[in-house]
Image (tube, rainbow, N blue to C red):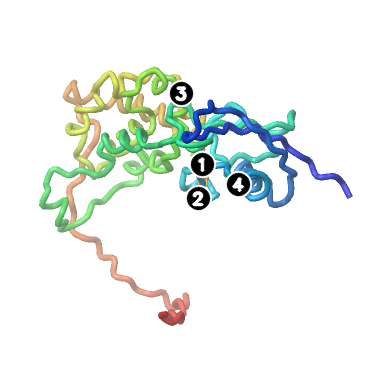
């Protein structure tokens, strides 16, 4: 039987409770059908070689954004990083925590600044008529074209890889960063939103859109194919247009609810009744 291929994992270890400096530790991991991604290798190490290893993960399918780390020098999600792809010319995989964050332990970063900045740009729909916002009498019609203006930015999973790759975040702690700015753009161009003026207070600033040097590294590492660098440049354009009095975004009025009464298709059988008994 062919011998299993063994990959050496060099992993950054840091224990905040000891006075020691961070250091790399090495683990040999045999590949198998159960160990094909970096996250699976980390699981293997924790279960079989060193239970003190700390890392964060949840969905295992590039949705929750928990397991961002630097893998062979590039910010990646461990669950999305395939060992085969990373070891074409080497048998070593090096893992360290994401840049631009404080490290809690081993490869677990403190994402608090990411979420704080995200919160600052008011990442929700704002409507000037508060009565309508909180007690809606109708709904908005949004065209396909209007949705396309921001749709790609809704795929952001807030993993923070873009912050880790951004040279401006590295140099300016106050810079809002690619994730928050791209999300600000997403809401500012939504035809249901009227929050641009409110958001300008924070966006139109040297630590806001004007801090971006357009290095593009945020877009290069996004695991969901979002292009935050593009969002930021479009946001700059939106802000300049606003200053010149040009209204780029057309706001649609609220309309009466559509007639969406559910009429079952007789050709499609209805779902069977719920059979599980309550405990
Ligand atoms: Fe959820 Fe990787 S574990 S994104």
Residue at 26% x, 35% y: name it: 120
Question: Which corner quadrant of the image does residue 156 belong to?
Answer: top left
53 or 224: nearer the eye? 53
**Element under disc 1:** loop
Asked whether disc 1 touches disc 3, contact meaning CB atoms under 8 Å apart, the reply is no
Give coordinates of residue 114: x percent, y percent: 37, 34
**Distance between mark 2 and mark 1 Cα atoms:** 8 Å
Looking at the rendered image, the disc whose residue lies closer to the viewer, 1 or 4, is: 4
Q: Is residue 155 above or below residue 121?
A: below
Q: Secondary structure at mark 4?
A: loop
Mark 3 and mark 4 lie on one chain; the one further toward the N terminus is: 4
The first of marks 2 and 1 along the sequence is: 2
- The residue where tag 1 is placed is 67
Using the numbered discs, state the Cα–Cα distance from disc 1 to disc 3 in whole angstroms: 22 Å
* Nearer-N-terminus badge (1/3): 1
Q: Nearer the viewer, mark 3 or mark 4?
A: 4
Tag 3 secondary structure: loop
Residue nearest the observer in this picture, 271 or 4: 4
Residue matched to label 4: 51
Q: Which residue is mark 2?
A: 58
Q: Are marks 2 and 1 in contact (CB under 8 Å)?
A: yes
Residue 23 drawn at (x, y percent): 59, 28
Q: Is the CB of mark 1 within 8 Å of ligand 1? A: yes
Q: Answer whether labels 3 and 4 touch (C-beta < 8 Å).
A: no
Ligand 1 within 8 Å of disc 2? The answer is yes
| 4 vs 2, front mark | 4
At 30% across and 19% down in the image, what residue appears? 210
Q: Earlier in the sequence, mark 1 or mark 4?
A: 4
Q: Please name the residue that numbered disc 3 is placed on.
A: 216
Q: Position of residue 232 (x, y in %)?
A: 35, 27
């Amino acid at each position: 039987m062919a011998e299993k291929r063994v990959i050496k994992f060099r992993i950054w270890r840091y224990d905040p409770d000891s006075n020691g400096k961070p250091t790399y530790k090495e683990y040999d991991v045999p590949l198998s059908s159960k160990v094909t991604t970096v996250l699976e290798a980390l699981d293997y190490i924790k279960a079989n070689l060193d239970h003190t290893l700390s890392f964060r993960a949840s969905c295992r399918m590039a949705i929750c954004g928990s397991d961002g780390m630097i893998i062979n020098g590039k910010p990646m999600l461990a669950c999305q990083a395939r060992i085969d792809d990373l070891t074409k010319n080497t048998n070593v995989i090096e893992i360290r925590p994401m840049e631009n964050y404080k490290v809690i332990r081993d490869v677990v970063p403190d994402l608090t600044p990411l979420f704080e900045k995200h919160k600052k740009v008011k990442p929700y729909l704002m409507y000037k008529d508060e009565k309508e916002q909180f007690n809606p009498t109708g709904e908005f019609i949004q065209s396909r074209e209007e949705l396309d203006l921001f749709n790609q930015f809704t795929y952001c999973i807030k993993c923070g890889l873009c912050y880790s790759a951004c040279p401006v975040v590295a140099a300016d702690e106050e810079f809002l960063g690619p994730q928050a700015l791209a999300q600000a753009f997403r809401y500012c161009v939504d035809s249901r939103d009227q929050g641009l003026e409110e958001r300008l207070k924070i966006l139109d600033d040297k630590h806001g859109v004007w801090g971006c040097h357009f290095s593009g590294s945020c877009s290069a590492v996004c695991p969901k194919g979002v292009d935050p660098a593009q969002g930021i440049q479009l946001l700059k354009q939106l802000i300049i247009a606003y200053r010149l009095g040009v209204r780029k975004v057309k706001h649609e009025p609220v309309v009466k609810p559509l007639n969406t009464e559910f009429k079952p298709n007789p050709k499609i059988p209805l779902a069977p009744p719920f059979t599980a008994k309550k405990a």
